[in-house]
Amino acid sequence: MNRFWSRLVHELHPYVPGEQPHVADLVKLNTNESPFGPSRRVLEAIRDATAETLRLYPDPNATALRQSLAAYHGVRPDQVFVGNGSDEVLAHAFVALLKQDEPLLFPDITYGFYPAYCRLFGIHADTVPLDASLRIRIVDYSRPCGAIILPNPNAPTGIALSRAEIAALLDAHPDQPVVVDEAYVDFGAETAIPLIPAYPNLLVVRTMSKSRALAGLRVGYAIGNPGLIEALIRVKDSFNSYPLDRLAQAGAIASLEDEEHFQRQLSMVIDERDRMTEMLTRLGFEVLPSAANFVFTRHPACGGAALAAGLRERRVLVRHFGKPRIADYLRITVGKRSDTDALLTALKAELERAS
Ligand code: PMP
């Protein structure tokens, strides 16, 4: 507490990101990063951008990157907004679209930045409980609201909604902005992007942090009809007109140009997720059906906090959220095959210790 702080700051409970340890000998399965490196073309593009142009400001409109993203997703460049990670894109969306006079609806168990942004931007949140199997039920979103945001697949459960379910949500709320956060969609869920022509209220938010192995570059983007994108640009230009640096713009474009590398890594993560799910199930874990690069899992004989602490002692980092209804669960990022093996060895030892 500090008497120079604003009242707002006194009342904030900021989002706490997963630990980024400063030692290398940990099996790091706690923040949903890719276990593989980005395409070599990304590294070359960043090196070239560094040598040639770092003394110059970047393109404030990220024109080339927006063109590349538009071509990749089959939309027009005026339907694309880019920002410094999808967290920043989401922040702009909260100010530009989600701050309405009526409450914002989102799931009670979901990405922790949504409640944090509500407090920061003075938005009234109305959270909708997940059902008994920790799923989002679209019918529960039929109550009056000013706007809606949800991740698909949801985080931290990893469970996906179908495109038809997203369309039903949009049909039920034609006059409210609806933001679908597709941070993990590439790992097995249906994107809502094909719905955009029919729904002027839909904004889809994406990141290059997970499926494109570029968390360190901080590139996020949004796709929607030009009216929504224009609102995000107004907020950006009132805040920081250079959201993406030159290296990020160059690297992101190069990533989109290496589809083969992208697809290969996606299938390696998905195969390893399936193997990990099977091995965890054999150890007695209940694993929720994941369409993401992580699994959400619990063991009937061992609490989540104890397991997470025990794994940490054994040099394996996973994520545990000590929240009601999910306190027994661990969120475990899909890593390399050797990471899964180390995880399973540590889990077996922990389960033996607990029995
Ligand atoms: N949305 C969800 C659901 C996430 O889990 C994350 C990653 N923590 C983000 C958005 C933000 O990703 P980034 O800022 O790295 O693009």
Image: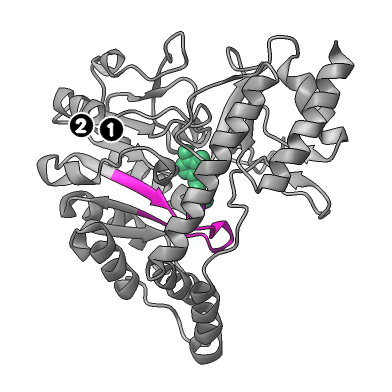
| Residue 204 placement: quadrant | top left
Residue 321 percent coordinates (x, y): 64, 25
Tags 1 and 2 in contact by the CB under 8 Å rule? Answer: yes
Work out whether residue 202 or residue 155 is closer to the camera in this orientation and state it: 155
Q: Is residue 206 magenta?
A: yes
Q: Is residue 197 visible?
A: yes
- Magenta range is 204-221
For residue 267, which numbered disc appears in the image?
Answer: none
- Circle 1: is it few (<14), some (14-19), or many (20+) Cα within 10 Å? some
Secondary structure type for disc 2: loop
Mark 1: which amino acid? Gln
Residue 242 percent coordinates (x, y): 42, 69
For residue 100, which numbered disc appears in the image?
Answer: 1
Image-based side of 235 in relation to 311, left or right: left
Secondary structure type for disc 1: loop
Give the quadrant of the N terminus: top right
Image-based side of 134 in relation to 11, left or right: left
Work out whether residue 142 or residue 302 is closer to the camera in this orientation and state it: 302
- What residue sits 26% from the left and 70% below the top? 67
Residue 160 percent coordinates (x, y): 39, 30
Q: Is residue 90 magenta?
A: no
- Against 218, residue 200 (above or below) is above
Q: Which residue is mark 2?
A: 176
Q: Determine if the C-beta at disc 1 is less than 8 A from ligand 1.
A: no
Give the quadrant of the C terminus: top right
Q: Is residue 10 visible?
A: no
Colour scheme used in the picture? one colour
Mark 2: which amino acid? Gln
